[in-house]
Amino acid sequence: MNTERGFPLRIYPLGGFEQVGRNCTVIEVDGDIYLIDLGLQFPDEGMLGIDYLIPDISCLRGRENRIKGVLFTHGHLDHIGAAQHLLPQLHFPPCYGTKLTMAFVRKRLDEEKLTAKVPINVVPLGGRVRLGKVEAEFLKVTHSIPDSAAIALHTPYGTILHTGDFKFDLTPTNESPADFQRLAELGKQGVLAIIADSTNATKPGHSKSEADISETLRQLIRDVDGRVIISTFSSLLTRVQQILDHAKEFNRKVFVSGRSMETNIEIAQNLGYLKAPRGLVRKAAPGMEKLPDKEVLIITTGSQGEEMAGLARIGLGTHRHISVKPGDTVILSSNPIIGNERAVAKVINNLHMQGATVKTSTELAIHTTGHGHSGDLMLMHRLVRARHIIPEHGEPYMRAAHGDIARKLGYPENQIHQLNNGETLEFSPQGHARRSKQKIPTQDVIIDGYGSAGEGRRVIDDRKIMSENGAIVVVLRAYTDSKRLVGDPDILSRGLIYGSEQTTITGEAIKIARKAYEESLGRGETDRKDLKRAVNGALFRFFDRKVNRKPMIMPIIVEV
């Protein structure tokens, strides 16, 4: 990964360019390294049991001393959620971001007792910081969390602008609009390349303002006589502020359910990003039942149907402090993420069966995106007028739609760069761009329980095999010296064969396993790996032929 002669500026993503989430972009200037975001990606329905995935930073090993800084655009987990896993591997480089963003980064590090090891630096919106040959500037943009920033890297070879997640909201709640003036100034001064959010590039027009959502929520809260239960993302602090304002207006106390919601509200209140009079916000507790229903509003997590989150437990009747009663109105102030539709529908059905009235964004304007539609992207590009456009943050079809927008604006093909994770775009001092022939290998790095695994795809594939085809354990007892078998193998199956066929098929499998082992031994193969491989192959072919299944087969040789 040494800087090639004549191309001193390089950009390569390690995540976020083939998926929504796992955001991490690397920018190299004369060999110095700058990272923008260290995010996580939540698993889809095919990633059984996985907590989340993080970027593969193995290409940076051995070059950690070249890292001048990690720059965070905003405080959502898909941009900061891998910090506690990756910063130790990167030898704790200095980190930079706005006040609220760095408070959330600090919270992630606190959980692993790493905070004291990381140089945390707060940069105000509009502020700049010098990092080696580069000056990083944090520009105000609007998203669904306060203190969101676009980051301009002023390099000796031109300015690179990373938009972060953004939309142009002219009437945001609890914050000022984006810094249109500075974006236009950068455009006038000249921007070499823009790395821009693609999430909603397929959607026409401009994204809806938070002010519109606020008014709908206000009317709902005003008109409901019973309790109001609102579920939304714990990091959607602009929405939380709206809810607090309306609760105050209609004399409702706010009870918070869900650890992440409690934590985020506490951090934002302490820093002044959420404003509420003393006593308005409380934790959900048994005492809330003493208040009249008309004076109760509950904010909870679980808008995506997560099994262990507050809303799902309320719907199942297993929540410690909250149970649904007739007259309750539940508002899902969110849209289901792709893949979560069925889980959300299940929660809604449970709430209905408990007697609640449920309001969702399919019938009312009670949620809006934090990502700009095609009109927002066009406006960004008209303001910045970058020489090169790099669509980021999105699945391939989203980034392709972003490319189409650039073409409509008159950009030629050689100035629109569709990168995949691990692909490198290089710039000459004159601003000419080319794609490197060298591709950085990246793989899924999973976080599963308390550990991480670089071979994440293998773990997922193994679980998929077991979920669809079952598992077979074969125990073979053999003499230590001769390696000859002692009696027949034992076979234990799970999720594959049951009932009357089990005895017959197991009996056949035992004979096949014994035969495969003895034939392997007869060929002079005495290594345990060779013997296991022979048994595995024979049983795999047998079950494929006999029951049309390809189970996971685990031979175990016990020497006696």
Image (cartoon, rainbow, N blue to C red):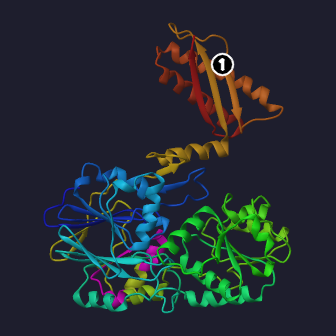
The region drawn magenta spans 381-402
Mark 1, residues whose alpha carbon is within 10 Å: few (<14), some, or many (≥20)? many
The image quadrant where one finds the N terminus is bottom left
Looking at the image, residue 239 sits to the left or right of residue 230; the answer is left
- Find residue 470 and report its horizontal and vertical position in percent: 67, 39
The residue at the point 30 percent across, 51 percent down is 91
Query: Is-magenta flag for residue 387?
Result: yes
Looking at the image, residue 390 sits to the left or right of residue 485; the answer is left
Q: Amino acid at mark 1?
A: Pro
The residue at the point 77 percent across, 58 percent down is 318
Query: Is-magenta flag for residue 12?
Result: no
Q: Identify the residue under disc 1.
A: 489
> Which residue occupies the foreground of this view, 419 or 135?
135
- Res 92 seen here: yes
SS for callout 1 = loop
The image quadrant where one finds the C terminus is top right
- Find residue 413 and report its horizontal and vertical position in percent: 32, 79
